[in-house]
Image (spheres, rainbow, N blue to C red):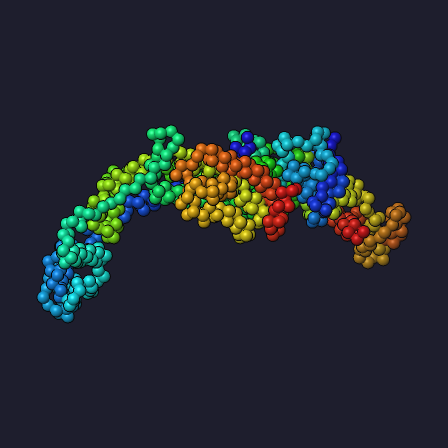
Amino acid sequence: MKIGIIIQREYLTRVKKRSFIIITFLTPLFFAALMFLPALLMQNSEKFDEKRTFAVCDESTIFINRFENTDFNTFIYIDNDIDDAKNLVREGVYDGVLYIPGTMLNLPTNAEIYSKKQIPMSVTTHIKSTMKQVLEHQKLLASGIDPDIVKASATTINLQTIRMSEDEGNDKKSYGELEFLLGMFLCVIIYFVILLFGQQVMRGVIEEKSNRIIEVIVSSVKPFELMMGKIIGIALVGLTQFLLWAVLTIGISTVASTFLPTQDVFSTGTVMNEQIADVQANTMNNDSLQKVFEVVNSINFHDILWCFLLYFIGGYFLYSAMFAAIGAAVDNDTDTQQLVMPITLLLIIPMICSGLIANAPDSSLSIWMSMIPFTSPAAMMLRIPYGVPIWQIAVSVALLYITFIVFTWLASKVYRTGILMYGKKVSWKEIFKWIKY
Amino acid sequence: MNYLEINHVSKSYETKKVLNDISIKVPRQSIYGLLGPNGAGKTTLIRILNQITMPDSGEILLDGKPLSPNDIANIGYLPEERGLYKKMKVGEQAIYLAQLKGMDRREADKRLRHWFMKFGIASWWDKKVEELSKGMQQKVQFIVTVIHEPKLLIFDEPFSGFDPINVNLLKNEILELREKGATILFSTHNMASVEELCDNIMLINKGQKILEGSVYDIKQQFKNHSYDVVYKPFDGSGEQHLTVNSTNPNELIREIIDKGELVSFNEILPSINDIFINLVSSSNKS
């Protein structure tokens, strides 16, 4: 089979390329680094930190001995006035001075830190939260309320959304945020891979046309075989890349998690939150970890993976057929711009509506978007994590695959005419004319 | 016996008639020249033979049978617009193209290595095409065209991009291929090589056949009875050259013999180049 020979060449020349190997192996490493490095750095932050001593010049006297010393930060309370203290900083006795001016009536809510070097955010956060705690405590006492009562009254609300299914006992808990994020992630990924591999098809066609090998080849095989061989070969390159990514990501995260227990990753992850709402942080820690596992378990990754592959293949074939037609119509890369525009626009529509779709995955807009073949791959990815009725997936996939067969057929007509046409500035009007030949 | 027969082939693009009722007969083991100015329809005719485009009407017989998709393996085509994948290795690429012509991988490898040796380019096997010069690439392309030992070879401007030494090498190869049984269709603007190689030619202009026949017959047909005469006059002066028109050469010689000693007497046959220019410009006027 000649198409087999073509697929083989298209596949092997791309897979053997240095850029393919580099991208395939570096991408999971990059993502792993993105996931684990911040956690790793946070964990070992002491290695990057240094000891500092701060003078506290507290005219209000409320905060004396209230700032807790940490491993790196020592607070020393001094009686000197602020100008003296500033001089001491200049001379290098202290790394900085915290100045809390005295107030007449109100509680002192303003403070200043003078230092020669930039004060790290962890220090300012620590100071602010200490002051806040102290002042709130004071205010409560002044109003005659026992601060312990307030502490005891703090409550966290858990609102569980459960989607009911027809048969009892199969109800699914759903976690809006995670599904939203997962949908967005899948939508962006499918958009990029369709565009990326579709444009590889286009560039491949342009290459054959511009180096003039095309006429030699079409005297041996049918243009349709050449076009399909290229499209299938590149699809296999894409699938190989996904497979390697999956294997490598699993491999790397297994290796990484043995060095770095998952517990720590999540707790260091909350360091960020701590700076915003540090009071809750510690109590949330274990709950949130448990919740993450629960959420992850609630999602059917198996189905999502299959849907992704199904829509990737359908969407890729549909778009790459159009890209092949464009590649055949032009003489070089620079001429493609205006012809590629409408096609990328079709792909971008669901991206633009992604917020609307993910927010209301069962609205009529969402359903229509996930049925129309040009938008369905990206739109369906937004809906999939929430669960989509099987008949909708079936109809949408059927429409997508029928459209891609029709478009491949149309594209092959444009392709056949275009590949032997040189030196002609081609418009969409011209391309539609070729379909009729 | 004709190996290739084209009967009443026509082809139009939209309203433009590119080929108008073209018929030719190419005898087995002959070299057939397809001549015509740019845009005459030569490339379209060649593409029809390669089944890249389909004719609107007419039929093509190869070895007495209508052209079929299986005939791809019987035809070797060197297009005028030709090239190779730049990033691919020479040997790998040659094997790929041979496979597309239906050859077995191992057989292709064996034959290619033989040809590479013959052309003295064996050391290029693992080089990338982009490392080769234009002329070197043409050699590879020639080999790829003939590698599957096709019975019909179609060369479109085969000598462009070659230096004189390699043109000669190529001419000898083409003649050798004919000896081995190939029938060759040859399109070119290089009239000198047409006279040297072709047994028969056809001249085509604006999609119309305006002339067909053997090179010898055509020259006879277009001769205008002029003769190049060199003689030494009896008065002892130097050799005289004369170009004379006459329908009666015997009469002419008789006249000259009286004037001096005849050194040489040659009929001037028109070159294919002159015939080409005359016919094309007069058919363009009409």
Residue drawn at 82 percent across, 44 percent down: B221
Closer to us: B178 or A313: A313
Residue located 60% across and 36% down the image: A222
Q: Residue furthest bottom?
A: A83
Residue at 88% x, 48% y is B247
Which residue is drawn at the image coordinates 60% and 51% (left, top)? A427
Q: Nearer the viewer, residue A317 or B24?
A: A317
Measured as percent of width and height from the top left, residue B157 is found at 65, 45
Question: Is B78 drawn above or below residue B38 in the view shown?
Answer: above
Residue B205 position in % (x across, y down): 74, 47
Quadrant occupied by the C terminus of chain A:
top right
Vertical comparison of A135 with A332: above or below: below
Q: Give how far across and how far down residue A211 sits, in percent.
A: 55, 46
Q: Is residue B4 above or below residue A419?
A: above
Q: Looking at the rendering, which quadrant does residue B118 occupy?
A: top right
Where is residue A433? Give x, y as percent. Answer: 64, 46
